[in-house]
Image (cartoon, coloured by chain):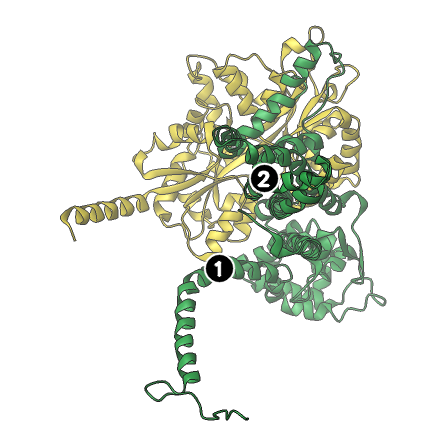
Chain colours: A yellow, B green
Amino acid sequence: MSKLLKVFLIASFAVASFSAKAVTVASWGGAYTESQQKAYADTYTDPSSIQFENYNGGLGEVRAQVESGSVTWDLVDALPGDAITGCDEGLFEDITTEIADLSTPGPDGESMLEDMENNGLEYHSGWDCCVPQIFWTYVVFYDPDAFPGDKPSSMADFFDVEKFPGKRGVHTWATGIVEKAMVADGVKPSAVPTVLRDQTGALDRAFAKLDTIKDHIVFWSSGAKPLELVKSGEVVMSIAYNGRVGAANLAEGENFEYIWEGQVLDQEYLCLVAGAPNRDAAIDFMMHASTPEAQAEQAKYITYGPMRASGIPIIQAGEPWGPGGVDIMPHMPNTPERLKVSIVSDPQWWSDNGAEINERYSAWMGN
Amino acid sequence: MEVPISTAELLTTDGVPLKQSLKKAERKNKIRAFLLVFPLLLFIIVTFVMPIGDMLLRSVDDTQINTVFPNTFAEFKKWDKEKDELPPEEVYKALFEELAYGDKIQVGRALTRMNYSKSGWKSLIKNTSRAIKKAVKKNEFPDSYKDFLITANDKWADPTFWYAMGQMVNNQTPIYYYNAIDMTYDQDQNVIRQEENRRVYVQTWIKTLKVSVYVTFFCLVLGFPVAHLLANLPLRYSNLLMIFVLLPFWTSLLVRTTAWIVMLQQQGVINGILVWLGILNDDGRLSMVYNETGTLIAMTQILLPFMILPLYSVMRVIPKSHMRAAQNLGAKPATAFWKVYLPQTIPGMSAGGLLVFVLAIGYFITPELVGGKDGKLIGSWIAYHLKTTLNWGLCAALGAILLGVMLVFYWLYNKIVGIDNIKLG
């Protein structure tokens, strides 16, 4: 064997063993992962030990890894429904004690979980395996130039095609839109999850409301689409992920307006994969990524809100917090006054009923 | 005069019968040939036969949940629905015990499965488990397990949950196949149609087939003249044209899809030009995307090369003299084309058609992006259940049906055209 080849082999082994030590985090990619890189990894004691990998959500890959016994991901950035199912199925490891012992308490000594409850969240079994990341929301936005006179300001307006003619952008799955339809039908936002859970026929009511705008909907299925739809004038207003709208406003000089009323807050977690190759290092990083400071830091790079209530005062005190010296609070979904008119999505209910409702929603869409 | 025929065996020079010696040589060759293809065979078995076998097994498999609740299900089968509205005490007792002492993770997996049979199982069992574990910890065992469970959650008095349990009590089940065509069980395990507002798969199957057939047809209609032109132009022009076919073929799928959206949307290029020319009113802009039209246009363009290339390679070798000869013998150009040229292109049309059809039937990213409300083809549902609901049984059933549909088309094709008639180049 030539000397060069030997050196090469040794070097590649060194690289392989080095990269094997890095904590691998599966996340959604794009601007979101970039914000995680900057807020969580770059502020970590050893930034180079954190590696992000893109995935498209869902538990398919995690289940395949865990079932086959060859786990390559340490952490997964998961939606609450996936956090619940993953934790119940043992795809994620239960770290209740680690969270109790190692997580950073809030400024008034409240535990991390209490800090989350202060933000309007309720315990679900996903909390046993995961640490909080951000609030993101399904929010309606529009270009004010499209409405020279009265501007829409409520869910009722979004569902009123007489008063505000023009098409609406709506996503192709049921989460978020069902709740919004209930608000448009007169249910108080904070009461929507309870009504959906407990009242028989509530879902029929939501679908009846959806029927009223069905012919005025352009359906979208990828997050960048609603911005194109509104920008090109294809629709006059659209539901979107609020972070996308925030990015357009802050970085691309757009002037979109939000309708915060009836926004549906959803959650995002960082979960530990069962049998993670770098379990301890991964837990250490989880604890770092869930401090109020790190959560507030993320808002510098993307307009999603911290899931820990104590993250908000840090941002408020630090304004201008946004890129290039702009205030970021106008774009934060979970300020106290906005929370009053918002729906906090109930992941347990969705994880119970999501499959059935999505089938119904698709049948409704296709007919 | 009779010629005597020797009955003695022919021998080779070393005295071994010729027949045997030949056989031996042949066997050696056979082994060698087998060894040569063995890696490929192994590869096909590992990457193709085994996954498909696994998929087919998964589509009927229900063993996991049966290992979690063996006693509950055994007792459940004894329940006489005519006599008692709710299952007997033994069922409640078995369930209590299996939830109290069952492995948390195995129960968690079973929950995901149970929720497919009826929404709400998940939180029902989770809440009940908590109450049960608390009672067991305090060593308080109820006198009536039935009352205990119903107090813990009144849904245990709701017979519809128990009816749904009937779907899961056997190790093998056809339920996923029924679900894949909008069927389900009623309380007595009779097969009935799914609730009306949930019937989504049959319409998706029809839509998927329709789109695939249309796309194949459009590709053929558009691809045939192009391939003909390519095959008959002088080489230097045809090479240039070929690049126009191949360039989009090599371009990213997402780029092409996005380009179509820009072209087709109501505020897009085509509508803009038509309005500018005065052909359309500003209010009368055509909706060509975010509906089925958009799906057909984008998919046809994306799959077109798969039709053109096999057609081209077949057409190129059809001698030009055939058409000339036919016309020389008195056929009009149309007749000559119909009777002489077209039949010779059938292998190319078949190869292209089959390729495009097979690719189209499994398509889902492009339709989702340009199809709007009509954009969910069967592939979307497979991906959705694979990733989001984790209902791999239903995924497998949908996949198996898809495989079946393709085999039917293949069989039909073989009957009508003959599989030997296929030619890729």
Specify the label residue A63 is tagged with: none
In the rendered image, the quadrant that contains the N terminus of chain B is bottom right
What amino acid is found at the position of numbered circle 1 in the picture? Ile
Could you say where residue B404 lies in the image, as x and y percent from the top left? 67, 56
Q: Visible in this render: residue B368?
A: no
Residue B69 falls in image quadrant = bottom right
* Residue at 59% in and 41% down: B321
Residue A161: x and y in percent read 77, 19
Say which quarter of the image contains residue A48. Answer: top left
What residue did someone put label 2 on? B320
When the figure is inspected, residue B209 is found, relative to residue B67, above or below; the finding is above
Q: Which of marks 2 and 1 is nearer the N terminus?
A: 1
Could you say which is closer to the camera, residue A98 or residue A69? A69
In this view, B130 is above or below B331 = below
Q: Mark 1 lies on which chain?
A: B
Residue matched to label 1: B44
- Amino acid type at circle 2 is Lys
What x and y, as percent, mark residue B332? 73, 36
User: Would residue A279 be visible to someone looking at this image?
Assistant: yes
Q: Nearer the viewer, residue A39 or A235?
A: A235
